[in-house]
Image (cartoon, rainbow, N blue to C red):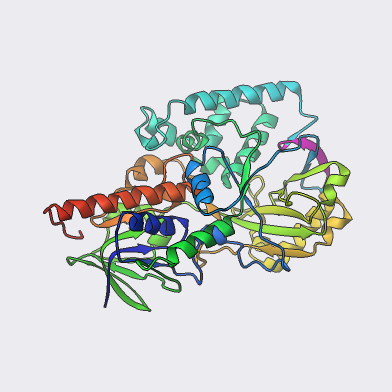
Amino acid sequence: MEQVEVAIVGGGLSGLAAARRLRAAGVSPVAVLEGAARPGGRATVMADAPLNGYSPGSMWLRRADRELIRLAGELDVPVRDTALDRSYDDLCMDDDGDTRVSRDNIPLDVTWWTRLRKDLLISRVVRMAEKMDFVCPWRHPKAEELDQQSVHTWLREHSSDQELLTLLEENLTVEASTPAERISMLWLLAHVGSTPVPDAHPLRLDPVLLAERLAAEVGADPGIRVLTGHHVAALDTAGERIRVSGDWGRIEADQVIMAISPADAYRVAFRPELAPSRRRFQREWPQAEIIRTEVIYERPFWREAGLSGDAYFDEGIPAYTLDDSPPGDGFGRLVAHTYTFGAASPLGADQSVAESPERHREVLLRNLEGAFGDEAAEPVAVAQSMAGPGVYSRAYQSPMPPGFLTEYGPLLREPTGAVHWAAAETAGFPENSTLEGALTSAERAAGEVLRRRQSVSNGAPQRAQ
């Protein structure tokens, strides 16, 4: 049986970064166990998309995403400064197929009074967020009160302007991928962060290139084995060492980092069983699934009509699009997001359509044609991400429902003996569930491993559980 110092379950950005950090500290051997056919996790969700030779889309990041920017620099992955051209118009399409010009999903014919109320209400949220503990928001003095309230309820306690409420909830849905009635007010304040003003010039990088270069560097290290196709089915923590197993065999490790989401960790059988509270936490972990579709055209033709490529669709297929065309005079690319929470809520998709890739593509292209004109119906390539509970590294976010953070927040990062919890979902806020969060959680979990290792070497032996 193979024996390692540390086994890392999950070969996404978090797992790979944790392995890299451990090797830098002299830990060896390390095994990274990835269930999918390639490492990279959500960063490579579109890596194998059939795009007829065109590269997959980029990802936007904040200037505050220091770990992501630092890693990109170390791996020689370009980070581009993106200037948003505000001279172009956005669009909104209602359920009847009628379109209106807008700015940031706010129709231009909205009254000045509604716009003022919107700014005042958002300013109030920002002031509330300034008092937040972004590492442990459940420690806020009013955490219980805030966490018991949905954003939907809070908004209606502070405004009766129905037009304003609709606009705010639609914008929140675009940001969180979940309707406002399913989101805790405490989670929203934590997610807003300490610097809620969007970057005037956001940054972009190629997430596939980042993941591939990180995987190549880690895989080339003789002290690390990156094993793809190794779905971990069970962890046995009863002995002096942890036994990690699947249909591929078994590995023994002194310590384990679980660099997978809590929902995926729930699929791993622990012997002895985890505490009931942790099992409930993993079982109930919220996942707002997104179908990401990349639509490629010979050129970004919408700009010729003075359009930005940003459009919002009440029908929900897609919920919105954005222009992700590469710089220069090259091809055009629209990235579209469809949410799978159902058509009963604003921007939600008809689930019978969302669950059929062929039907989803048909409806999506029809709506793009309605918004952008005939050329939108004739792309040179279309590819969409997969969804569903059996899919590794699918696209989703994790907005938390009322009551979740105060009940389960303290379990996010608490080690279980020699088992440590990483992955983006265990990070602080607002980077929780982002690629920045994947890297910060990797650094934290690796630090826990190193401290425990040092404690054992100093003569304080500890059992796995």
Work out whether residue 75 or residue 322 is closer to the camera in this orientation and state it: 75
**Where is residue 349 drawn, in percent x and y?**
66, 54
Q: Is residue 203 left or right of residue 29?
A: right
Which quarter of the rendered picture does the C terminus lie within? bottom left
**Relative to 362, 124 lies left or right:** left
Q: What number of labels is visible?
A: 0
Magenta part of the chain: 98-105
The quadrant in which residue 167 appears is top right
Q: In which quarter of the image is residue 274?
A: bottom left
User: In percent of the image, x 45 and y 39: which residue is there?
Assistant: 429
The percent position of residue 456, horizontal first and vertical second, equals 16, 55
Residue 351 falls inside the magenta stretch: no
Q: Quadrant of residue 11?
A: bottom left
At 49% from the left edge and 59% from the top edge, which residue is drawn?
Answer: 214
Of 357 and 40, which appears nearest the observer?
Answer: 40
Q: Position of residue 435 (x, y in %)?
A: 50, 50
In this rendering, the answer to whether 138 lies above or below 355 is above
Q: Write the residue at 53% across / 48% down.
A: 73
Which residue in the rendered view is the most extreme toward the left? Answer: 459
Is residue 138 something that shows in the picture? Answer: yes
**What residue lies at 13% left-to-right and 57% top-to-bottom?**
461
Q: In this view, does 193 lie above or below 447?
A: above
**Left or right: residue 340 compared with residue 34:** right
Asked if residue 283 can be seen in this view, the reply is: no
In the rendered image, which quarter contains the N terminus? bottom left
Task: Give the main secondary structure of the magenta stretch.
Answer: strand
Give how far across and how far down residue 238 sits, in percent. 19, 66
